[in-house]
Image (cartoon, rainbow, N blue to C red):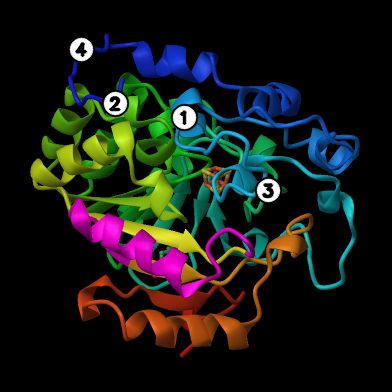
Amino acid sequence: MGNGSHTHTHDSWQRQLAEAIRAPQELLDRLQLPAESAAVPAAAAVQGFPTLVPHSFLERMERGNRNDPLLLQILPVNAEARQVSGFTTDPVGDSSARAAAGMLQKYHGRALLIATRTCAVHCRYCFRREYPFHDEPRRLSDWEPALQKIREDKSITEIILSGGDPLILSDERLRTLCSRIDDVDHVQRLRIHTRLPIVLPARVTAELLALLKGLRSQPIVVVHANHGNEIAADCETALRTVVREGIPVLNQAVLLRHVNDSAEALELLCRRLIGVGVMPYYLHQLDRVQGAAHFEVTDTRARELMNEIRNRLPGYAVPQLVRETPGESSKTPLH
Ligand SMILES: *Cc1c(COP(=O)(O)O)cnc(C)c1O
Ligand code: SF4
C-alpha cells in the first residue's frame, strides 16, 4: 500500500477492515507506547463503543507519541465515563427529526439516510456513538417507507447517505440503494458522508468510482479528516483519485481539544486538503454527546482560531465554523 498502485484485489478493503485493530493494548504496543491505566477500557461507556482502527490509519501515527493527534481521536480513555452536565445521548435532536425508518429530515431540500450502523473506525467524539441504530433498516425492503417519503416530497432534491459510514456497504448493496434513490426524478444530488477514504483508503476502488459516476444525479463526496497528518500516504492518493474522476469532494472536520485546536494544525489540515483538490467545508463545534466532554473547545477559542487561519489561507480554503443546534433550520454559523 501507499504507492498508489491499484493492485489490491476487489475484496482487499474488506479484508483490511476484518484485520483492523480492536484492542487498545494492541494499539499501544504497535505504537511502542507503554501500557497505561487511563487507556484501559474499564467503563461500560467505553465497552459499548469499542476500539476500532484500520492499520492504514495507524500507519499515519507517530511511534512513541502518546499525544499523536490521530491516536487521540481513536484511543478509548476513562474520561469517557465521566458524566458532564449538558452532554447527552442525543445532542443534535436526531430522534425528533426522524421522518421514516432510517431517514432524518431537518433542513429544507435535503434528507439524510442512516445507510448503515457500521463504521471502519470508532471516533471517540462521535455524535452518533449513542444513536439507537437497532431501530434502523437493515434489509433493502426496510428502506421502502423512506423511499416512499422521498418519492412523495418533491421538495427533496438532495439525499445524503450517512450512518455509520455508507461506504461500509458492499458495492452491490450500495448500488441497489443508490439506484432506488436515483430513480426518483426530483432528486438531483446524492451526497455521501464518509470517513472511509480517510481511514481505509483501499475502499476507493475503480468499481466504486464507476458506480458513482454512473448515477443520473450528481454525486458529491463529503469526507471527514481532522488533522493534516491524515491526508498522507494511501489516503492522499485515494482522495486525488476521486477528485480527478471529476467528483466534487468536500471535507468536514470537528474542532477537537489537543487534536486540532491550534492555528498551525488547522492551517496544515486545510493546506493538505486543497493540495489534493478537496475543499474544506465545515469546521464543526463538538456535538455535546455523552463521553466526549474532554474534547470540547470554547466558542471564544474557536472564533480566535478561525480569525488566525483566515489570515493565513486563501479564502476558498477556510471552512465555515458551525454548530448543530436542535430545531434550527440549518447548521448555525459561529462567526
Ligand atoms: C448536517 C445535516 C444535513 C446537511 O446539512 P448541510 O448544511 O447541507 O451540509 C442534512 N440533514 C441532516 C439531518 C443533517 O444533520
Ligand atoms: S466515522 Fe463518523 S460516524 Fe463513524 S465513528 Fe467516526 S465520526 Fe462517528
Question: How far is mark 1 from mark 4, CA to CA?
Answer: 19 Å
Badge 2 residue CB within 8 Å of ligand 2: no
Amino acid identity at mark 2: Gly
Of residues 8 and 268, the one nearer the viewer is: 268
Residue at mark 1: 59
Marks 2 and 1 in Cβ contact (< 8 Å): yes
Residue at mark 2: 2
Q: Of circles 4 and 3, which is in front?
A: 4
Q: Tag 1 or tag 2, which sits nearer the N-term? A: 2
Residue at mark 4: 7
Question: How far is mark 1 from mark 3, CA to CA?
Answer: 29 Å
Question: How far is mark 2 from mark 1, CA to CA?
Answer: 10 Å
The answer to whether residue 239 is left or right of residue 224 is left
The vertical placement of 15 against 168, above or below, is above
- Local crowd size for mark 4, using a 10 Å CA cut-off: few (<14), some (14–19), many (≥20): few
Amino acid identity at mark 3: Tyr
The answer to whether residue 270 is left or right of residue 205 is right
Amino acid identity at mark 1: Glu
